Every structure is written in C-alpha cells, then in structure tokens.
C-alpha cells in the first residue's frame, strides 16, 4: 500500500518543532511545555478557552471509530516527558489533520495539578482524569508516559515511548487506511491467529491452578478472557461472556479468565460479585499477557482443542457471534461468515 510521504514529512516537521520547543528542563517557575517566550507563563501552548476535564469512565476508544487516535497516558506533575507529549499532541491538533483524533489521560490522583495547568485554556483535544487507573489499567501501561496509536476500529497499533522520527510515518499510514486495506501494525506480533497458544499454569483463588491444558481438555472451544477489575469494560465483558459460557456449555465451550495486574481483596470481591463460573488465574507480573501480545483489555482469545489460536481481539459482541458459529457450524463457517452490523461495539 502506498503511504503518503509528503504528509508524513510535513507532520514530522510540525512534531519536531513541538518537541524542540519543550526540550529544556522545567523548573518550579518554568512555563508548561510548548509555550513561547512571549506567552503567558501560566497558559499551556495553543490554548483557546476553558478546558473541560472528563472522568475516565467516559473514555472509550470506540467513540473515535473511523479515525486514528493518538492517546497519551501521562501525568502533569513530575514528568517532563508527559509535558513534551502534550506539546506534541497540541502541534498535531494545530496541523488539523483529517481522520485523526487526540486524547490525554492523567494517570494519577492529582487532578488539581491538571486543573491548574489548563485552567486558563483548553488543549483543543479530549482530556481525561484517571485517578483510579481505569484507562491506564485497560491499556496495560507500564511507564509514564506511554503513547498509543489506535486504529480506526479501536485496535492498538503501537504502544510505547514517543519517537518523533517514527510517529509521523505511523500516523500517516494508519490515517490513510481504507476498509479492506492491510493494517499497519507497529507491535511485535505475538500469539497471532493460527499460531500455537502459549502454555500457562497460574495460581487462582481455588485449590487448582488455571492452565491452558485444563482449559482445552474435553473442550470443543476455549474462551480465554484477559480482564482487570480496574478496567471499566471488563465487568460488562465478564457478564456477557459468562452468559455465553452457560448457554454453550453443552456444546463444548469452556471459559477461563486471566486477571492482569495486582491481586487484592477488592479484586477477589470484583470477580465474586460477577459470579464468574470458572477459574480466575492471577497474572500479577503481566508475563502471560505479554506472551499473548495483549495490548488492551478486555481481550478475548478463542483457542481450539489442539491449542491453536482461532481468534484474538478486544471483547465485543463479535466475540460471542464467532464462538456461537464455531460451536454450531464449525471453524470454517466462523471464519467466513461476515460480521453483523454493529459488530465491534462494546
């Protein structure tokens, strides 16, 4: 697929200006990243009016469907690179690129600092406060800041640090995609469809561990869900997939859940309240999520009896449809049957 080189070069120039503008070390009296010498030192770069800080519960990547999304998860206080990222996002906004959305998530309880920083203006893109780590947990961030490039269907294409040499090309490529085009993915592909599922055995709340071997034993299909009690969408996915597992238990559907992140009494209460009808494995060090290439949760993995991954995707109604068709009509029908209208909307 031909990539729009000229647009990428122009974007690279804009981003380089933003990054250079905030490359100096900020002090307690320094201006926020991206401000000019002549600007009001209390006003962030490019601001135009009062900012509205939205709660993390309102963040949903599907709300940006049809556009590529650049997402930064960072924090205003004590993180120079988060401020540099904000300046880069603002420069992207100024470029006014079609098919591109921008969002910043404050991944710390210090909402007052965020309010103070943008009190006299708005960045011109969505800003969310995430004191409980809901969005951060959903996207499995491991460092502040973490940047994400999310495709037009809500799937993560890149996760990691900002790189002003790579990002312009990546953004241009994902923005230019049309339905049916091959997706541009900038992640190391792990546990792809038609590959062997990584074996595992995890401690659980019960006496027996949760394992791949046990999950596929005597099953026609295994539904493996990666979830987290902080993720605002995991509860909904668990509820609907629990119903699916009960409905298709006699058809040979087994279900296992992997909790990604730290386990504590609140975590146990979360799963107990949902009456999850299967073992919940504890992936506290996130090694299994990494082995399966999980970039966001809830992600559902459908695994065949021989341990082959049939599909892997963020949970949506399409997960239930594919599993139902597979169990009733076989893998070929599940692979070929087109998605129904609305598929992919959580």
Image: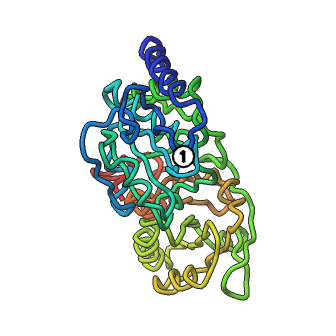
Residue at 42% over, 75% down: 239
> How far across and down, in percent of the image, does residue 251 sit?
50, 73
Name the residue at 49% across, 19% down: 12
What is the residue that sits farthest to the left in this orientation?
A: 49
Query: Is residue 248 left or right of 342 when viewed as pictured?
Result: right
Is residue 93 among what the camera can see? yes
Residue 280 location, quadrant: bottom right
What residue is rendered at 32% in x and 49% in y? 119
Residue 95 appears left or right of 10: left
User: From what the image shows, is residue 277 above or below residue 89?
Assistant: below
Q: Nearer the viewer, residue 53 or 234?
A: 53
- Is disc 1 placed on a helix, strand or loop? loop
Percent position of residue 2, x then y: 47, 15
In front: 164, or 173?
164
Is residue 301 or residue 4 the one in the foreground? 4
Image vertical order of residue 3 relative to residue 100, above or below: above
* Residue located at (43% from left, 68% from top): 237
Would you call the spot at circle 1 few (<14 residues within 10 Å), some (14-19), or many (20 or more)?
few
Residue 4 position, x and y percent, is: 44, 16
Above/below status of 333 relative to 270: above
Question: What is the x, y in percent for residue 116?
Answer: 38, 53
Colour basis? rainbow
Q: Which residue is mark 1?
A: 28
Q: Quadrant of residue 197?
A: bottom right
In the image, is residue 212 above or below residue 36?
below
Q: How many marks?
A: 1
């Amino acid at each position: 697929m031909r990539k729009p080189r000229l647009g990428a070069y122009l974007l690279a120039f804009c981003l380089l200006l933003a990054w250079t503008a905030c490359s100096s070390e900020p002090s307690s009296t320094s201006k926020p990243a991206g401000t000019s010498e002549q600007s009001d030192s209390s006003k962030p770069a490019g601001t135009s009016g009062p900012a509205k800080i939205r709660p993390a519960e309102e963040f949903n990547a599907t709300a940006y469907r049809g556009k590529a999304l650049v997402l930064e998860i960072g924090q205003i206080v004590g993180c120079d690179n988060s401020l540099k990222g904000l300046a880069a996002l603002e420069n992207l906004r100024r470029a006014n690129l079609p098919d591109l959305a921008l969002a910043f998530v404050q991944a710390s309880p210090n909402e007052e600092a965020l309010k103070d920083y943008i009190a006299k203006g708005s960045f011109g893109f969505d800003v969310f406060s995430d004191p409980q780590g809901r969005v951060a947990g959903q996207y499995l961030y491991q460092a502040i800041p973490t940047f994400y490039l999310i495709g037009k269907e809500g799937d993560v294409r890149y996760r990691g640090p900002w790189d002003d040499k790579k990002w312009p090309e990546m953004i241009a490529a994902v923005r230019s995609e049309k339905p049916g085009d091959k997706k541009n993915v900038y992640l190391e592909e792990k546990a792809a469809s038609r590959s062997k599922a990584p074996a595992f055995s995890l401690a659980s709340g019960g006496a027996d561990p949760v394992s791949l071997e046990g999950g596929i034993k005597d099953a026609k299909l295994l539904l493996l869900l990666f979830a987290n009690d902080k993720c605002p969408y995991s509860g909904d996915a668990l509820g609907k997939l629990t119903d699916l597992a009960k409905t298709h238990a006699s058809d040979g559907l087994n279900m296992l859940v992997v909790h990604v992140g730290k386990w504590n009494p609140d975590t146990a209460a979360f799963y107990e309240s949902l009456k999850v009808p299967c073992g919940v494995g504890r992936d506290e060090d996130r090694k299994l999520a990494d082995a399966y290439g999980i970039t966001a949760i809830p992600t559902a993995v459908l695994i065949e009896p021989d341990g082959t991954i049939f599909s892997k995707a963020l949970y949506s109604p399409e997960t239930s449809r594919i599993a139902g068709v597979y169990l009733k009509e076989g893998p070929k029908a599940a692979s070929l049957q087109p998605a129904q209208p609305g598929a992919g909307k959580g």
